[in-house]
């Protein structure tokens, strides 16, 4: 999993061809990952984080806000 994240996922997100008008979500993703690096060194822990994030219902306003609050606290 670490190889995929470091060697494929992050580079692909950094190189997304997306404009703010035609693909605003892609544009935001590219900008968010433009200077991002994976600091997780343990694939098992990374998988656990991915599993937890996958449990979030992003259609639920309350869960999105909770996730946003958690993210801000981590920063």
Image (tube, helix red, strand yellow):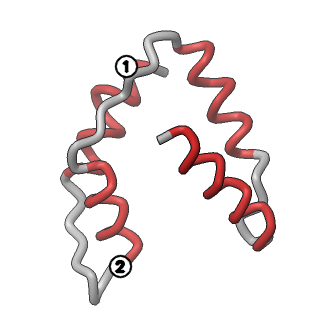
Is residue 45 left or right of 38 when viewed as pictured? Answer: right
The relative height of residue 33 versus residue 21 in the rendered view (above or below) is: above
Residue 27 position within the rendered picture, expressed as x and y whole percent measured from the top left: 29, 70
Query: Could you say which disc has been placed on residue 39 in the image?
Result: none
Q: Pointer 1: residues within 10 angstroms few (<14), some, or many (20+)?
A: few
Is residue 33 left or right of 4 when viewed as pictured? Answer: left
> Marks 2 and 1: in contact by CB < 8 Å?
no
Residue drawn at point x = 22 percent, y = 50 percent: 34
Cα separation, mark 1 vs mark 2, equals 28 Å
Q: Say which quarter of the image contains residue 69.
A: bottom right
Q: Pointer 2: residues within 10 angstroms few (<14), some, or many (20+)?
A: few
Query: Could you say which disc has been placed on residue 24 in the image?
Result: 2
The one nearer the camera, 4 or 27, is 27
Residue found at the far bottom of this picture: 21
Is tag 1's residue or tag 2's residue first in the polypeptide sequence? 1
Residue 14 position within the rendered picture, expressed as x and y whole percent measured from the top left: 23, 49
Give the secondary structure at mark 1.
helix
Q: Say which quarter of the image contains residue 68.
A: bottom right
Residue drawn at point x = 45 percent, y = 19 percent: 40
Residue drawn at point x = 61 percent, y = 13 percent: 44
Closest to the camera, between mark 1 and mark 2, is: 2
The relative height of residue 19 versus residue 27 in the rendered view (above or below) is: below
The one nearer the camera, 42 or 75, is 75
Q: Total marks drawn?
A: 2
Residue 50 position within the rendered picture, expressed as x and y whole percent measured from the top left: 63, 35
Give the secondary structure at mark 2.
helix
Residue drawn at point x = 22 percent, y = 44 percent: 35
Query: Could you say which disc has been placed on residue 3 in the image?
Result: 1
């Amino acid at each position: 999993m670490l190889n995929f994240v470091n060697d494929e996922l992050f580079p692909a997100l950094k190189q997304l061809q997306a404009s703010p008008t035609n693909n605003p979500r892609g544009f935001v993703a590219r900008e968010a990952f433009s200077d991002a690096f994976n600091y997780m060194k343990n694939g098992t822990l990374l998988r656990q984080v991915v599993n937890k994030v996958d449990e979030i219902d992003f259609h639920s306003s309350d869960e999105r806000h909770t996730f946003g609050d958690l993210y801000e606290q981590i920063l």
